[in-house]
Image (tube, grey):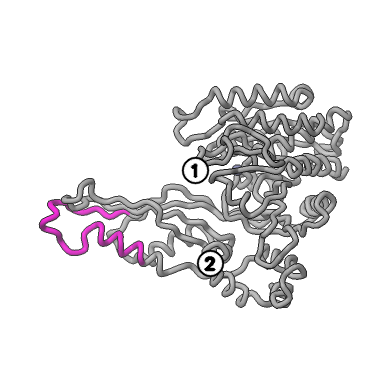
Amino acid sequence: MNDDAAVAALQALVRIPTVSDRDPDKVDTAAFDELLAEMQRRFPLLHARLELTRVDTHALLFHWTGGSAAKPVVLMAHLDVVPVEGEWQHPAFGGDIVDGNIWGRGTLDDKGSLVGICAAVERLLADDFVPAQDVWLSFGCNEEVSGSAAVLAVEELRRQGVEPWFVLDEGGAIASEAFPGVAAPIGVIGVTEKGVTSVELRVEGRGGHASTPAKMGPTARIARAITRIDRSPMPASVPAPTVELFRRMGPHAPLALRPIMKNAGRAKPLLTRALLAAGPEPAAMTRTTFAVTTLSGAPALNVIAATAKAGVNIRIMVGDTVAGVLEHVRKTVNDDQVHIDVVEQNEPSPISPMDEAFELIESTITELFPDAVPAPYVMMAATDSRFFTAICPRVYRFAPFRMTKAQRESIHSYDEHLGVDAFLDGVRWYGRLIERLPA
Ligand SMILES: [Zn+2]
């Protein structure tokens, strides 16, 4: 599979609108069928020589038998994309190449990785290469809607007695403009991710006509609960991976910032304060966050709400727990009449160690992207790989593609695009990673 064929494969897969939805009836299953058929056409050796287990509706779990099954590796990506939003410069499902970029939904999230992995494997198979270790490819079909494919893939691996040495999923990137004043791109490797938990605050009342309101009705109580949560953030601190991230960026930072960044470990309180003051994004790196997202009251303007509700989306920092966070909400709201219904709960992922497997990822980054500084970081968003922490302590989130700040912001937004050269570097990176697996 030459470079042109790899690029054409990415274009072809981007043109198939595999949009997932929480409601299975709203999923265009024909699109997913078509995607699987297209993959089979584009990657014939992969499909002929790897053993395939179908998981969930359209998820794929491939097994490539290597020289040893002692340290199996799982490479992940997902087939589904989020719906199209906003005004695009080029068609969202066009896969057009303009100005050296491939445009379209999924180029970065996550068909770039999907095709990158498959193209690398296809090339190695063409050379009759046998990896030193078993390689598993796990491609989910409902990552964007927290679907069950990843959980089922983990179950299947467990059933087959597979305990991965490490798991690699989307998440990080070769990120330019990662930190103000740092010119070098940072090869950020997610070693943990925040846990996503949602609760609904609910107050029930008698309702009635809006001409005769009582004091502290359901809506007022909900409003008070919201402002209390807003005013009582959880304690902030800088977790170990963030300390290491700053330590590694230190030599590349503006002179004035170098001492504090190089000594991030000892300067933790100072660093915490600086991040908190730097805006919502850096602040989110230091603690569990609460965002009140949905609100509901009466169905009409002249009716007193019988039920008032507020949805709170919580991103739990590594070190905190679901139980601890719910206790914080209960104490902060401090009102028996406000019911707290847990809608979804996920603990933050444990921190993956920076040992031999991390070093392999790191040195492969340095080999392919000599200008980049590899570093661990805490992911703010959720990936399918969080479920793999149940069977593997080393779960890393990294996509080997150069991404500007604007490109990272286009994920789940509009004008998503991936550089053709950046994509091809990524294909080579996946290939080198597989070639370098130790015996
Ligand atoms: Zn994704």
Q: Residue at x 60, y 43 (%)?
A: 416
| Residue at the spot of label 1 | 86
Quadrant position of residue 53: top right
Return the residue nearer the eye: 144 or 419.
419
Answer whether residue 93 is magenta in the image.
no
| Residue at the spot of label 2 | 279
Horizontal side of 331 relative to 104 (left or right) equals left
Q: Are marks 1 and 2 in contact (CB under 8 Å)?
A: no
Q: Is residue 396 visible?
A: no
Horizontal side of 209 relative to 150 (left or right) equals left
Nearest to the eye among marks 1 and 2: give it.
1
Residue stretch rendered in magenta on the structure: 202-227
Answer whether residue 222 is magenta in the image.
yes
Q: Residue 150, image x and y in percent?
A: 60, 38
Which element is circle 1 on?
loop
Quadrant position of residue 231: bottom left
Q: Residue at x 24, y 57 (%)?
A: 218
Question: Could you say which disc has been placed on residue 358 in the image?
Answer: none
Q: Residue 216, image x and y in percent?
A: 21, 63
Quadrant assignment for the C terminus? top right
| Amino acid at the residue labelled 2 | Gly
Horizontal side of 410 relative to 204 (left or right) equals right
Q: Residues within 10 Å of mark 1 (few under 14, many from 20)?
A: few
| Amino acid at the residue labelled 1 | Gly
Query: Whereabouts is ligand 1, in terms of quadrant?
Result: top right
Q: Residue at x 44, y 33 (%)?
A: 23
Q: Residue 413, image x and y in percent?
A: 54, 46
Q: Earlier in the sequence, mark 1 or mark 2?
A: 1
Q: Is mark 2 within 8 Å of ligand 1?
A: no
